[in-house]
Image (cartoon, grey):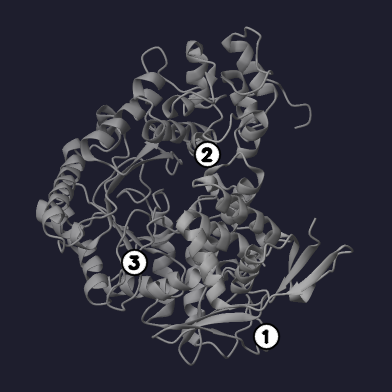
Amino acid sequence: MNASTTLVYDGSFNGFLTAVFVAFDEKINVADIQKNDQTQSGLFSDTETVFTHVEKAKRVWNGVRNKSHNAISNVYFAFLSEAEGVEMMLYSYIQKLMRTKNGKYLDYSDSTVLYIAQLARKVGREKHRMEAFVRFQLTKDEIYFANIEPDFDVLPLISKHFRDRYADQKWLIYDVKRKYGIYYDLDHVEMVSLNLKDIHYNKTVKNDAFTNEEYEYQTLWNDYFKSTYIASRINPKLHTQHVPKRYWKYLSEKKEAV
Amino acid sequence: MNFERIREKLNILADAAKYDVSCASSGSDRTNKTKGLGNASKMGICHSYTADGRCVSLLKILLTNHCIFDCAYCVTRKSNDVPRAAFKVQEVVDLTINFYRRNYIEGLFLSSGIFKSPDHTMERLVAVAKKLREEENFNGYIHLKSIPGASDELMYEAGLYADRLSVNIEVPTISGLKLLAPDKKHEDFTKPMEKVKNEIVRYKSERKIIKTTPKYAPAGQSTQMIVGASGESDKDIMYSATYYYKTFNMKRVYYSGYVPVTHDSRLPAIGSQVPMLRENRLYQTDWLLRFYGFSIGEILNNQHPNLDMDVDPKLSWALRNLHHFPVNINTADKQLLARIPGIGMRSVDKIVKARKFRKLNWDHLKKIGVALNRAQYFMVCDSRHWERRDLDADKIKGMILQNSSGKFRNQYSTQLSLFN
């Protein structure tokens, strides 16, 4: 039996795909695939560091995509979940996919396939939530600015949505948890990292980074939100089910509730 | 912008609009081509939820709550003593654009009380939509109310700018309409629907030939009915809903449990409970008709004019038709799978795909997400364990109710509670 090997990659999606490529290419008996900032060497396995190689990554991407478009988006979405041990699950998912002719991604009675499909769905839900729960605030230098703190790393997934929608305004969405953001300068979207002094969640004190008009519209929005419910139908449980409390911090209509 | 004045108006006119339940922003595929503002999302986005758990996706306001009509069920009717206000066209446009830019909303839902005449009102609504589209280059979602009695020309123009048009018929029966809204005629509602339907059909066929044909109300039409105001049965409501789906190609019919807003001997008194459970059962029925392949006569007929309150309509149908069951999960076709209580369309889809690889057993079904507490009495799968007892409908119903819990359970339980 071959000795098993732990592959270590740089944490990027391309890095992960390169690791998959290397594993297939060198017929490695993979013990685990780990990010380089959280390695943990096994007792009976060697460790090998994989250097990200875009061409190799692309070959895996195309290989999976040729099997099915659905499968490649499942792989990408599930990877962004940052779930513990997801790399190994994805590796075995890709193995299963490649071994069969086609359609394996539809085998919901296989536990790996079902797990990946459900995980991808969770990430998809978070993506959709972020498309809904981002609240821009207009800064004095005319940038619509929002802080978010999503459960999964969904910024790469939502950038197209916001670029298409807000094509005529500058905007910046910053992920507080992962410390990077995406910025649109009326032409294209780029990744930025900021040195934020404070996080802009709901505060009752006005911050002078934002325009005065901004606070007026927030008040109007708050008022509107309050006048939309029918008192005799009130249902707090359903409300928090739809808008979980962990998001309230950044929703301006929840200013008073936080 | 006079902030305080706008604030006052918004409070009055948003409050009056909240009884309209429709807040869908889905179904439109308007895209942002010229670097303008906005892009309709095909699946719709709910940006927030109200304290009563309903979606907030559009800025839902009235243009004005002045009204010349006196419909008994309506909060803005002529004889009601409430503060009145009216927005200017530009004010609505500014609010919409600024809310949209901050990602608060998907677009605008504009309704109105009828001032002066139906045409006069409709003209103002169309003016708002036109301004948004042509001056602001706005591609977000616009839902306009068709004002009952508006002329064909205005309805035609409305469809050019709006994504969805709707007329609320509110009272499902013609006799009820005579009683509660004596100023309105049934034809006033159906005429604008008819016009819009015909235009949608015409534009669709034209697009097949000329690709650049502009969009005409791409998200279709919808309507709304009040439930529990005029003593109609579930059968009346669902048959008339089916009529509107078929005759006018409605995208949606909404059911709104009547919230008492006035003292009127023709209506339930203020403070009586909103029939939310009934509303829920009607929506379930609506779904069965649209997605599960049921026909209306199977669920509601002269023997069963009302839906069961204690079990959902699909389970209730299954209990009346035990001769169709048990169904074999591994061989039955899609339509039959969809009729098993506890199996939704998503599960049907997963089952059909998964069973190509192996025969499915209880474990698989559980992981896929089937509600086995209901489904187990109506199906067999690849397992030696299945319901062998010859149970009758009452027995099955009893066992299902015993082994499950429901949020509405306390409303129909005959068991007295010990502590309250």
- In the rendering, at what x and y percent does residue B26 appear? 38, 54
Q: Are marks 3 and 1 on the same chain?
A: no
In the displayed structure image, the side of residue B249 where residue B117 appears, left or right: left
**In the image, which disc is placed on residue B350?**
2
Q: In 3D space, how far apart are the residues under numbered discs 2 and 3 (Cα atoms)? A: 34 Å
**In the image, which disc is placed on residue A170?**
none
In the displayed structure image, the side of residue B298 where residue A194 appears, left or right: right
Would you call the spot at circle 3 few (<14 residues within 10 Å), some (14-19), or many (20 or more)?
A: many
What chain is tagged by disc 2? B
> Circle 3 sits on which residue?
B140
Tell me which numbered mark, 2 or 3, is placed earlier along the sequence.
Answer: 3
- In the rendering, at what x and y percent does residue B230 appear? 37, 30
Disc 3 element: loop
Q: Name above or below for residue A48 compared with residue B60.
A: below
What chain is tagged by disc 3? B
Disc 2 element: helix
Q: Is residue B204 or residue B249 the one in the foreground?
A: B204
Q: Quadrant of residue B416?
A: top right
